[in-house]
Amino acid sequence: MLSRRQILAGLAALGLAGCQSTGTPQASSRGRETGGEGQSPEAKIAGVSAALMALGPGVDSKEAVRAATIAVRYPLELAQRWQVVDPPLAHNFKVVHGIREKGVCRDWATALHEAMRVEGFRTLDLHVGMANARSVSLEHVSLIMTAKGQVMQSGVLLDPWRIGQGRLWYARVVDDPRYRWETLEAVRAWQAENKARALNGL
C-alpha cells in the first residue's frame, strides 16, 4: 500500500494537469453507463453503500455507509469551495489558465483519498487508479475502494470529476464503459521502463 506522500509525489510526477473524457464510451461488461447519474445524494449514498457491501462478506456495513457518505457529500462541499460551476473540461481549462485553483481530476482524487484515509477503515482499502497513461489521451485519475486485501480491479470506482460539479460517478472498476484502469504502481513502472529504453536508444 502506498503512503499518502508516495501517492501525492507520484501524481505530481505524472503531471496530471487535466483529465479528459474519451468521447464515445467504450463497451463495458454490462454495456451501459452505471454511474448513478441523476440520482439524489441520498439514493447515491445507498447505491455506493450497496456496491461496497457487495465487495465481500468481510466489509463492515457501518464502514460502507460512512465511506459512501463521504464519497457523495464531500465532493459537493469541495465543489463549492473550489467554485466548480462548469462541466469538467470547461473547469479544467480554468484551472490550467489560473482562473481557478483546483478542480482537475487529480485534485478530486487526492482530496477524497485523504478524507477516506483519516477514517482508518478496517475492512476497506484505498487505491489510486489511473487511465489513459499509455495513450495519447490525457490521463485520468480517481479513487477506488476494495475489500481489505483485494486487488484494485475488484473494487468500486469513486469519480467526483466525471459528471462535473462534484457529483459522484461510481461503478465497479470492471464495469466502467469509458476508461481502462491501472494502478499507480503499474503506470510508474511502465514509465520507468520506457525512460530506460529511451536512454539506451532502444
Image (cartoon, grey):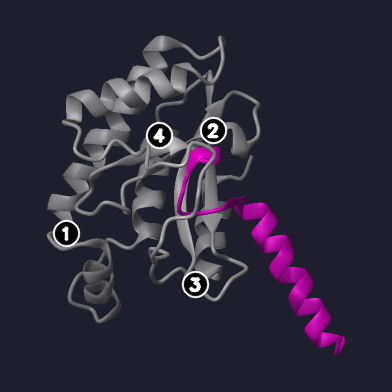
| Residue ID for mark 2 | 155
Instruction: Identify the residue at horizontal 39%, vertical 66% (top origin).
Output: 20
- Left or right: 189, with 128 as reference point: right
Q: Amino acid at mark 4?
A: Met
- Left or right: 178, with 77 as reference point: right
Q: Amino acid at mark 3?
A: Ser
The magenta stretch spans which residues? 173-202
| Residue ID for mark 1 | 84
Q: Amino acid at mark 2?
A: Gly
Nearer to us: label 1 or label 2? 2
Quarter in which the C terminus is drawn: bottom right
Instruction: Identify the residue at horizontal 25%, vertical 44% (top origin).
Output: 75
**Disc 2 and disc 3: Cα gap in Å?**
24 Å
Badge 3 vs badge 1, beta-carbon distance below 8 Å: no
| Residue ID for mark 4 | 116
For marks 3 and 1 on the same chain, the one whose residue lies earlier in the sequence: 1
- Give the class, few, some or many, for how many residues have Cα within 10 Å of label 1's Cα (few <14, many ≥20): many
Instruction: Identify the residue at horizontal 27%, vertical 61% (top origin).
Output: 103
Badge 4 vs badge 2, beta-carbon distance below 8 Å: no
- Give the class, few, some or many, for how many residues have Cα within 10 Å of label 3's Cα (few <14, many ≥20): few
| Residue ID for mark 3 | 137
From the top left corner, tell me how far across and down residue 126 is, in percent: 52, 36
From the top left corner, tell me how far across and down residue 72 is, in percent: 26, 34
For marks 4 and 2 on the same chain, the one whose residue lies earlier in the sequence: 4
Badge 2 vs badge 3, beta-carbon distance below 8 Å: no
- Left or right: 4, with 63 as reference point: right
Against 48, residue 96 (above or below) is below
Q: Amino acid at mark 1?
A: Val
